[in-house]
């Protein structure tokens, strides 16, 4: 029993009879012809695709050159305005600088708009501590919530 348990089970059983399988030479030759025909067809197709890509690229290039010629004809040479030339030389501010100037202007406008509120705050600061501003009673009516009617809670 000990021999059965220690037997090596990793070996593969092989047959001693040689396998005699002969391929049909006509079928092998036909397969090679078919493979060669497919290879030639793929090469021809690749050549046709390359030619088509070249033709399309040339057509795109021709259209782009025509558009450039048309654009140059429409635009023409640039005309310099004598009034605009000095102004362009003076305007050396970047976009960021223009935005900062605009924000300063907006801030000044907001301060001007709120000047009455600022004046009131300054006036309160300047008033002495013993002269507190008098409080004016409000004349708004006081509303109270209506009493709920219905089932009363248990106490």
Image (cartoon, rainbow, N blue to C red):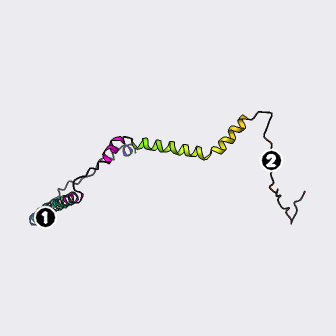
User: Residue lying farthest front?
Assistant: 83
Q: Which residues are magenta?
A: 68-93
Q: 57 left or right of 143?
A: left
- The residue tagged with tag 2: helix, strand or loop? loop
Residue corresponding to mark 1: 41
Q: Please tell me whether mark 2 or mark 1 is closer to you in this view.
A: 2
> Marks 1 and 2: in contact by CB < 8 Å?
no
* Residue 132 horizontal/vertical position (percent): 79, 38
Taking depth in this image into account, of 17 and 85 the one nearest to the observer is 85
The answer to whether 14 appears left or right of 100 in the picture is left
Quadrant occupied by the C terminus: bottom right
Q: Quadrant of the N terminus?
A: top left
| Along the line of sight, the residue nearer the viewer: 35 or 52 | 52
Q: Taking 90 as reference, is 118 left or right?
A: right
**The stretch drawn in magenta includes residue 111:** no
Within 10 Å of disc 2 (Cα), the crowding (few <14, some 14-19, many 20+) is few
Above or below — where is 129 with respect to 29? Answer: above
**Percent coordinates x, y for residue 52 in the rendering:** 16, 63
């Amino acid at each position: 029993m000990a021999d059965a348990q220690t037997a090596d089970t990793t070996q593969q059983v092989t047959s001693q009879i040689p396998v005699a399988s002969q391929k049909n030479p006509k079928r092998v030759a036909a397969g090679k012809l078919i493979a060669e025909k497919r290879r030639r067809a793929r090469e021809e197709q690749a050549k046709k695709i390359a030619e088509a890509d070249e033709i399309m690229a040339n057509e795109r290039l021709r259209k782009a050159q025509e558009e450039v010629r048309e654009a140059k004809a429409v635009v023409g040479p640039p005309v310099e305005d004598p009034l605009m030339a000095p102004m362009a030389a003076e305007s050396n501010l970047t976009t960021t600088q223009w935005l900062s100037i605009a924000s300063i202007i907006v801030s000044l406008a907001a301060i001007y708009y709120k000047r009455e509120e600022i004046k009131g705050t300054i006036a309160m600061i300047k008033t002495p501590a013993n002269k507190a501003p008098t409080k004016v009673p409000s004349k708004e009516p006081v509303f109270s919530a209506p009493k709920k009617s219905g089932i009363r809670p248990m106490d």
